[in-house]
Image (tube, helix red, strand yellow):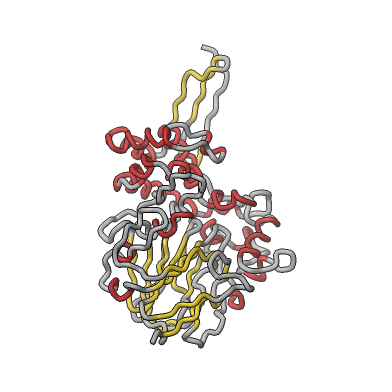
Amino acid sequence: MAVGRINVGFELSRVRHCYYFDVGEEEVYRVRTLHPIVQEFKDFIEKDGAAYAAFNKMFEQAGPPQNDQQRRVRNYVELMEAIDTNLAIVPTYRPGPSVMVAGVPFYGIIACFCNTNAGYEAFTHPEVNKRFYGVFTVWHTYLMSPASARVIHAEEGSWLNTAALKAMVQSTGGNPEQDTFESFYVCNTTAPHYGFKSYDELFVRELHLRHRTPVLPENPAIVNSACSSTVDKLYNNLQKTDKFWIKRTPYSLSHMFADDLLTDQFMGGTLLQAMLGSLDYHCWRSPVKGTVMKIRLISGATHANPHPTYYTACLDDNKRDQDVVSRSQDFVSNISTRALIFIQAEEPVGLMCFVGVGLGEVSTCNMVVRQGQRLEKGAELGQFHFGGSTHCLIFRPGLTVMPIEQDGKPLVKSKVRVGKDILTITRQN
């Protein structure tokens, strides 16, 4: 047998082999050793009938590929290989429409399958999400290691090149032609990697105090933005239970709160939801002055589910929006990893709740507050790690929640910096 090409790869301080033996143009033999956590995932798919059927059908039902990664994935075997490869990938900076996918490389592969019926079946399977949990645990460990700092330098595609630094400044509300990264973020420009020891340290970088100070901090009728984010919607008359899985349907409080004892206090209330992009500041800060009444970390669809639901989206028959998780923010707020922080604010706000929701591989919600803690506006509540996410502010009934225009534009769809005044609250008569 003539050998036309041999390709061998080694990654993540372990041996992973890809051998290709060609005769002319035809590939006749290939062996690949997967990471054990991915091999176990593949074995599960092949042994579980429901998962096997779903992972095959979703390739038939998916639309045309949207990026190079998707073009290289034609079946579940190649999907497992792509997941295996991504374990050694650190998100890089890409300008334009690619910026979100660059920050969430697993989602970049899987997004096209989320809007299929078979993908819905596959990605809601508890055992499938258990395997994703194992994959992301390995990946997150890598992103917190010093090896992941290899993308924090000034070369093209890395996070300290001029285009990336300007993009992060602009995302935070600065002028990229006048303001510098170091004038916005705490860093050491003379140290290797600006002093960031890992990709995760860069991702949860801290703003200087002057750029996160809340507007009107002593006015209890003003609610400030808890995150640097783009406001998605303001929704009234929340219901305790509703059909959240149908497109453009209301939120379902009992699911969002996992049947928490405080759920009934928010029936008929108001919700604001906003999305964080990969370039945004990812710390959460208190939108009100008050006391932490209760905190909960919910791993998945209910408090009893030990694993979140990672890649399920609300199905859309027209399939025009390929960014299925972003357009399904309300849907995933009922089933993904989420942190609940109930705060007893000064009147007129009263009891409200901050909900941080981890999307896709961005499944880490880290809370830093405790029950009974007194909060000033702007006090740190926690952080997202590893990619873009979404969050909600939920208010009780009996309040008039009025959005504040941003630079003469409606609040909904506006980009707001953390600490910006976004809502005015009054008690109804």
Residue located 56% across and 69% down the image: 206
Placement of 359 over or under 72, stated as above or below: below
Instruction: Residue at the far top: name it.
Output: 1
Q: Is residue 374 visible?
A: no
Q: Which quarter of the figure has residue 2? A: top right
Comparing 74 with 180, the one in front is 74
Task: Give the x, y percent position of residue 390.
Answer: 46, 62
Residue located 29% across and 48% down the image: 126
Placement of 88 over or under 236, stated as above or below: above
Task: Give the x, y percent position of residue 131.
Answer: 34, 45
Task: Give the x, y percent position of residue 315.
Answer: 41, 48
Comparing 422 with 363, the one in front is 422
Count the marks: how many? 0
Comparing 237 with 98, the one in front is 237
Instruction: Residue at the far front: name it.
Output: 429
Left/right placement of residue 158 relative to residue 383 reads right
Task: Give the x, y percent position of residue 82.
Answer: 47, 38
Residue located 54% across and 52% down the image: 103
Left/right placement of residue 176 relative to residue 420 reads right
Q: Is residue 106 visible?
A: yes
Q: Which quarter of the figure has residue 194? A: bottom right
Q: Quadrant of the C terminus?
A: bottom left
